[in-house]
Amino acid sequence: MRILFIGDVVGDQGMDMIQTYLPRLKRDLKPQATIVNGENATPVGRGISEAIYKALLSSGADVVTMGNHVWDNREIFDFIDSTKKLVRPANFPGRDVPGRGFTTLQVNQKKLGVINLQGRVFLPPLDDPFQVADRIVDELRQQTDMIFVDMHAEVTSEKRAMALYLSGRVTAVVGTHTHVQTNDGQILTGGTAFMTDAGMTGPDDGILGMKPEAVIGRFLDQRPARYEVATGPNKQLSGCIVDISDTTNQATAIKPILINRDHPYLN
Amino acid sequence: MRILFIGDVVGDQGMDMIQTYLPRLKRDLKPQATIVNGENATPVGRGISEAIYKALLSSGADVVTMGNHVWDNREIFDFIDSTKKLVRPANFPGRDVPGRGFTTLQVNQKKLGVINLQGRVFLPPLDDPFQVADRIVDELRQQTDMIFVDMHAEVTSEKRAMALYLSGRVTAVVGTHTHVQTNDGQILTGGTAFMTDAGMTGPDDGILGMKPEAVIGRFLDQRPARYEVATGPNKQLSGCIVDISDTTNQATAIKPILINRDHPYLN
Amino acid sequence: MRILFIGDVVGDQGMDMIQTYLPRLKRDLKPQATIVNGENATPVGRGISEAIYKALLSSGADVVTMGNHVWDNREIFDFIDSTKKLVRPANFPGRDVPGRGFTTLQVNQKKLGVINLQGRVFLPPLDDPFQVADRIVDELRQQTDMIFVDMHAEVTSEKRAMALYLSGRVTAVVGTHTHVQTNDGQILTGGTAFMTDAGMTGPDDGILGMKPEAVIGRFLDQRPARYEVATGPNKQLSGCIVDISDTTNQATAIKPILINRDHPYLN
Amino acid sequence: MRILFIGDVVGDQGMDMIQTYLPRLKRDLKPQATIVNGENATPVGRGISEAIYKALLSSGADVVTMGNHVWDNREIFDFIDSTKKLVRPANFPGRDVPGRGFTTLQVNQKKLGVINLQGRVFLPPLDDPFQVADRIVDELRQQTDMIFVDMHAEVTSEKRAMALYLSGRVTAVVGTHTHVQTNDGQILTGGTAFMTDAGMTGPDDGILGMKPEAVIGRFLDQRPARYEVATGPNKQLSGCIVDISDTTNQATAIKPILINRDHPYLN
Ligand SMILES: [Fe+2]
Ligand SMILES: [Fe+2]
Ligand SMILES: [Fe+2]
Ligand SMILES: [Fe+2]
Ligand SMILES: [Fe+2]
Ligand SMILES: [Fe+2]
Ligand SMILES: [Fe+2]
Ligand SMILES: [Fe+2]
């Protein structure tokens, strides 16, 4: 089995890259499951709407994961409970949290579990993602031993700690949130694929996908700034491919996907 | 001109990789200048000692840069003022900060300026690195237009903001501190090379180079933990190569260097 | 000389308390100078408008100080440069920061300097308030040795550190920002009055002056919440009185002012 | 019933104040229960030892509460499980956390529950103190409706949010950790006494009880500094008295206790 994962889709340019390249990637790489992080997919780069969510599915996503921006577009409350394919960080606290933190996907004769977790270092104090991961992985493993984790977190240490913690218990831990792809795809002991961050899908000339002037301006004067999705002709799509052995269900390879001006899509 | 930059050297394993591979890299890649981040180079992974500093120079480093761990080994106060080749973050505040925040290196007929800056997002409130960069770049550009910046910072946005801010004014901005190499080397407008993080040089099986048990344990129980440099057979060396046009003095290429079990050194 | 200082005025209820009690306090306590922190004085509890600013002056304020919310109501940019009596944190960085960080007030034959500073612990990395204080205090002391500092900061240690740092150089350091009055008014060595926080002027039944349901709700579910100024019948006014010797210009006493349901105004 | 609570005891000077004044306070104020926060009671101001713990008990404490420094003196692991009278923050995560997060105390015919909680704003991400409080309060209320909560937290909003959250379910919520007593003792709806911070018991001339030179020095140069407990002749004892109706078991009054040079003990 092969999983295609696409990192944080940002704004219209991100959706554009999805609509242009996701069908080609699926045609050429033939993944059996496609997972897309959509926490920044609205035109303003924060949260998701039902229309965008449906556009992601119709472009080829099987599951959409989220992150700290999950609730930023309040429209999500209207549809999150009506779908199995949208997964928000599982460790949001409290009773009756809208939506779900993990899901399963039927892939031929097999099942793939997909979990979304959010780190807590330099992010709000959600419930402990390690405890929550234990609980969900235990539950999912009664159905399947193929589990993909989108670990949405700021610091490298927390993402790698999660990957090592779950090593041998899940198939892949791939980080999101920093919007910059890391060059460290690797197979950990126990057949768990890991990459610290899958990178971002959206405007190439911004900072986190946002217009650089506002971001730099704020660093300079520390006054409130309105962040807007960057414009400009250059766009990127970032993600990774995880290959899984059909006999052991362990990951055998993880490879970065990167499409931008410097890395044109060649197929 | 070609610059070889090596990211945060951690502990004995990091020094081992330096001593084994830096001479080969210099022989094979023929950089005219070699810069090494040494903020974690002592055996305990924090700070630097005079012996380690000298070992870095004799292994081939022309300049050693630092970061937030610069003062962690108090031995540094004994020798930092006696050398031009050790550069600590230029934006440490106050009068009479020991050492220097930038230096120059004679490379044949040319001069290379080297600046070390530290970010402030999720790090202590040093002086504003953007203001400090303005001042130093202005000063250095009276001597040379080849300037290399080691931007030691936590978040991707602050590193990229610095790179875009200095774009066209310096030759390269390369990030350090997260200990994970990013896959985003690029040439910005104005001929400035940029990579969010050069990655780490040291133990391959740890977290930030430290033993995973203690790091994971602390995430689980939030109690004090003693972090020790990881052991185990696997080590890595991370960094990048920046190529500079001899006619324009602008960067023309930036390429990652990564040596580990999965990426053996082939020359 | 006697200075009356009123802590963070929040919303309509805060303005109500100002309009009701500030005239009485001035009549009964006879301060020669009245300083009011107005960073939360708009009806929504964030920033200041020209109308509110003028209402503070006409209620008896001689100088209005601010804090981290200074720029939250963008109307401030329209009038901040046209007045000497509005003081924002002096350590906002960059060139051409709108407004001023300190001012002077003529009080009979004497001059009173008023400085507003903002701390950096758990707040944005403005310029170093200690360095900035040094510079402004030096400048002001060429005109007067009576200087009042509103130190707007989160943690007790940074406020007390500033007070001890300026002890003997200024007349008073009074903290703001936590919206809770501290019980530690004291005269430091050198005749500097200090109180960690003057407290808040506004709704008594909220949290920081905001409706408790939203604040508690956010602690419980970590989802975005709309904070609104608390309603309800109970209101408070908080501040302090600083007495200064006319011969030495040193502070001789600092006493809390607190008016609320439990502490009715008796004069 | 009357409860005497003493805020964070710091170093030898704090222990000195306890040994000098706690017996007198008990003689004069006649509390039926005495609770002391001991998280800084060792000579270095961090953590607690068995000898110090026993000294607190023999000076008159019935229960000792802790805070974020609970594990700083590793000696605590040797005795914390052998006593019912030492209570550490109940929301430390993980299985098999040493010690206990709440206890009960027999007072004549009645029982008093004592809970220690730690906030998470600007502090490590322990388990959610609100959820944990719900669980423990439910459990304790099967035995007693007199419950005292030491809420160890940085910001005023989190402490007040906890007090309002538990209002009507516990007898008192008193904050600790900032080491500065607040002037806001009040009885909330439902008969719950609340004070944002009880203040500190220890050296009067320091910052948080530590030598000011090191703390100020660190603000100035952002380099590592060794914090030592302040010396000097002046000391303080801070805390509060909570009075509880014997018929309703609701709090009827909360009053600050403050003994220092400016507030000598008069009985
Ligand atoms: Fe994102
Ligand atoms: Fe995110
Ligand atoms: Fe490092
Ligand atoms: Fe670092
Ligand atoms: Fe305020
Ligand atoms: Fe504020
Ligand atoms: Fe404490
Ligand atoms: Fe504490």
Image: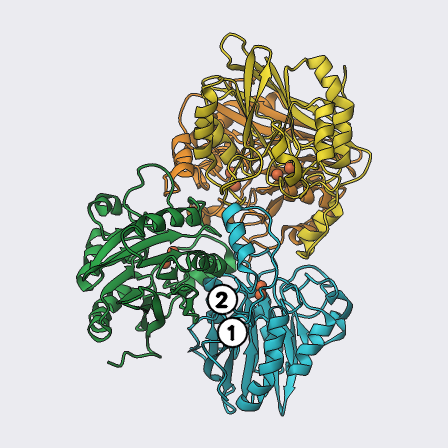
Chain colours: A cyan, B green, C yellow, D orange
Q: Are marks 2 and 1 in contact (CB under 8 Å)?
A: yes
Q: Is residue C252 above or below residue B17?
A: above
Residue C181 image offset from top left, x and y in percent: 63, 30
Q: Is residue A4 above or below residue C108?
A: below
The image's mark for residue D19 is none
Horizontal placement of B143 versus D231: left or right? left
Residue B132 image offset from top left, x and y in percent: 39, 47
Q: In this view, does A207 lie above or below C169?
A: below
Q: Mark 2 lies on which chain?
A: A
Q: What secondary structure is found at the residue carrying circle 1? A: strand
Q: Residue at x 64, y 78 (%)?
A: A63
User: How much space separates mark 2 and mark 1, taking CA atoms?
Assistant: 8 Å
Tag 2 residue: A159
How crowded is the residue under tag 2: few (<14 C-alpha within 10 Å), some, or many (20+)?
many
Nearest the eye: A8 or B233: A8
Q: Quadrant of residue C38?
A: top right
Tag 1 residue: A173
Residue A134 image offset from top left, x and y in percent: 57, 69
Amino acid of disc 2: Lys
Q: In which quarter of the image is the N terminus of chain C?
A: top right
Same subunit, tags 2 and 1: yes
**The residue at label 2 has a CB less than 8 Å from ligand 2:** no
